[in-house]
Image (tube, rainbow, N blue to C red):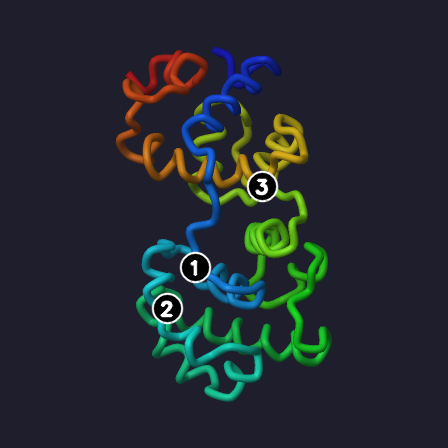
Amino acid sequence: MRKRLTKIEKSKVLEILDGLYPEAKAELNYNNPFELLIATILSAQCTDVRVNKVTEEMFEELKKPSDYIGIGVEALERRIRSCGLSKTKSRNIVATCGIILEEHKGKVPDTIEELIKLPGVGKKTANVVASNAFGIPAIAVDTHVFRVSNRIGLAASKTVENTEKDLMNSIPEERWTKAHHQLIFHGRRVCKARKPLCEDCPVNVYCLYYKNGVGK
């Protein structure tokens, strides 16, 4: 049973995703790198739709790191409670804001290496911020990207870290950010976790999940 697509097949899958989602982009709402950082921290184990509802009003009042430090952890926790993990997220956000002020002159760091040093910022969050806010090629592997890429055969790994490496090898660097968003779109709309719409999926001509009979 094959686990990986050939180089040509991978290229064909990317072409199909281009046709399906030519305008794929981040579905979190933000106006600048700082807002994207906050929204991405909030999105851990939470939907983008929920995060956008919370940040719509919050970003009107809290615009810079000092604003979050000013209201404090407890007040922030109440505002973000519906996003889940509010205690941890509020502590991390306030701590991150402190570091941004003290070590980065109030600006969000623009490298993955510096971003992952911030509380609440793992590799996925760092990749999202770096690629979308600063144009740095990166593939953030969330649950959708992990599921879809391994099902199709763009990757063949059991961990997020190795899936990221597989995708970096499978996809041209200049397409990393775009492909990341396209895989998320496909995971939300077609290649769903519990009931993937395999019969209606344009990728099924190449998809190993479908070809191996799992999705039939």
Cα separation, mark 2 vs mark 1, equals 8 Å
Indicate the position of residue 167 as horizontal and vertical percent values: 60, 32
Q: Quadrant of the C terminus?
A: top left
Horizontally, is 157 left or right of 54 in the view?
Answer: right
Q: Earlier in the sequence, mark 1 or mark 3?
A: 1
Circle 3 Cα neighbour tier, 10 Å, few/some/many (<14 / 14–19 / ≥20): many
- Residue 64 versus residue 208 in the image, above or below: below
How much space separates mark 3 and mark 2, taking CA atoms? 25 Å
Q: Marks 2 and 1: CB-CB under 8 Å?
A: yes
- Helix, strand or loop at disc 2? helix
Q: Looking at the image, is 132 positioned above or below residue 165?
A: below
Q: Amino acid at mark 1?
A: Asn
Residue 177's label in the rendered image is 3
Is 203 drawn above or below residue 36 in the view shown?
Answer: above
Question: Which residue corresponds to the image point at 37% horizontal and 61% vertical from the top-left?
Answer: 52
- Mark 1 Cα-neighbour bin, 10 Å: few <14, some 14–19, many ≥20: some
What's the residue type where badge 2 is placed? Answer: Glu
Compute the Cα span from label 1 to label 3. 17 Å
Label 2 neighbour load within 10 Å: few <14, some 14-19, many 20+: few
Q: Quadrant of residue 157?
A: top right
* 2 left or right, relative to 79: right
Circle 1 SS class:
loop
Q: Which one is earlier in the sequence, the residue at label 3 or at label 2?
A: 2
Q: Residue furthest bottom?
A: 70
Q: Residue 29, labelled with which disc?
A: 1
Q: What residue lies at 69% left-to-right and 64% top-to-bottom?
A: 109
Checking the image for residue 56, the label placed there is: 2
Q: Which residue: 37% across, 72% down?
A: 80
How far from the left and from the top, in percent, is residue 194?
Answer: 28, 34
User: Image check: 102 left or right of 59?
Assistant: right
* Numbered disc 3: secondary structure: helix
Q: Amino acid at mark 3?
A: Thr
